[in-house]
Amino acid sequence: SQQGEEDPQALSIQEGENATMNCSYKTSINNLQWYRQNSGRGLVHLILIRSNEREKHSGRLRVTLDTSKKSSSLLITASRAADTASYFCATGSGGSNYKLTFGKGTLLTVNP
Amino acid sequence: DADVTQTPRNRITKTGKRIMLECSQTKGHDRMYWYRQDPGLGLRLIYYSFDVKDINKGEISDGYSVSRQAQAKFSLSLESAIPNQTALYFCATSDPEGSGGPTDTQYFGPGTRLTVL
């Protein structure tokens, strides 16, 4: 069963606006990652935040993690049409049997 | 990611046929994974392998089998394909030896679109 659950399922914005996507999860984690998928293609890793971190930046991406609320958010600033894609959060947990569990994704559409 | 390749990229087959999907990687990673993606359901883990001698079932392994022929190769087989196995299949690799502890960032292949009629 999926660990992470993204919200909203779909988001449509205009170019230049900021896009915020949220992820909630149920059990304790080692880290949380965000991936991007262009239509029908493989997922591409965007950013990883560890359980002892609260915020991380990478270019126009900002990720926050609140372990007390078991939630994370991904903010894309100054969005571009090329940011149109599905975005997935993935939680890492499990000790020696470590693997990722993916959510169902948020479909972001950035209109030019 | 060109370092992870999947063949075939598209396949149409009939119910009851045996199908093999192949994955090769040049990243030198020990860990490899097979996922399927269905609309609205995200990615679900079928099988994973942490090294050549290690094979583990994921959450939806029924109807599938795998073979880890070498560090670089991980194949997924459908012994007798059925229509509800129609999906997009992804192979991925990971390297847990990132700085600061295991990161398990995954690197995905381009996917195989499988249609079972």
Image (spheres, coloured by chain):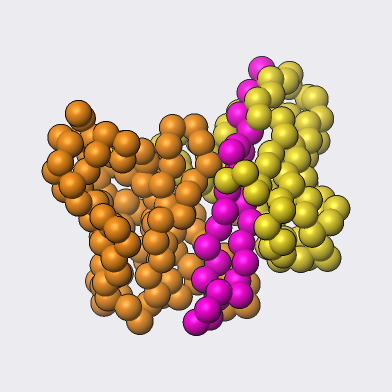
Chain colours: A orange, B yellow
The structure residue drawn at horizontal position 71% and vertical position 30%, both measured from the top left corner, is B8
Please give the range of residues in magenta: B89-117
**Residue A32 position (above or below residue A67):** above
Tally of marks: 0
Quick check: A59 left or right of B101? left
**Residue B5 position (above or below residue B71):** above
Where residue A9 sits, quadrant-wise, is: top left
Residue closest to the eye, B49 or B16: B49
Question: Which quarter of the rendered picture does the C terminus of chain B lie within?
Answer: top right
Quick check: A58 left or right of B16? left
**Residue A90 position (above or below residue B85):** below
Whether residue B94 is in magenta: the answer is: yes
Q: Visible in this render: residue A41?
A: yes
Where residue A84 sits, quadrant-wise, is: top left
Whether residue A85 is in magenta: the answer is: no
Task: Kindly give the residue lying farthest to the front in the view shown.
Answer: A59
The structure residue drawn at horizontal position 22% and vertical position 43%, both measured from the top left corner, is A79
The structure residue drawn at horizontal position 52% and vertical position 63%, both measured from the top left corner, is B105
Residue closest to the eye, A27 or A72: A72
Picture coordinates of residue B42, whole percent (x, y): 46, 44
Picture coordinates of residue A96, whole percent (x, y): 62, 77
Picture coordinates of residue A65, whole percent (x, y): 28, 70
Q: Visible in this render: residue B84?
A: no
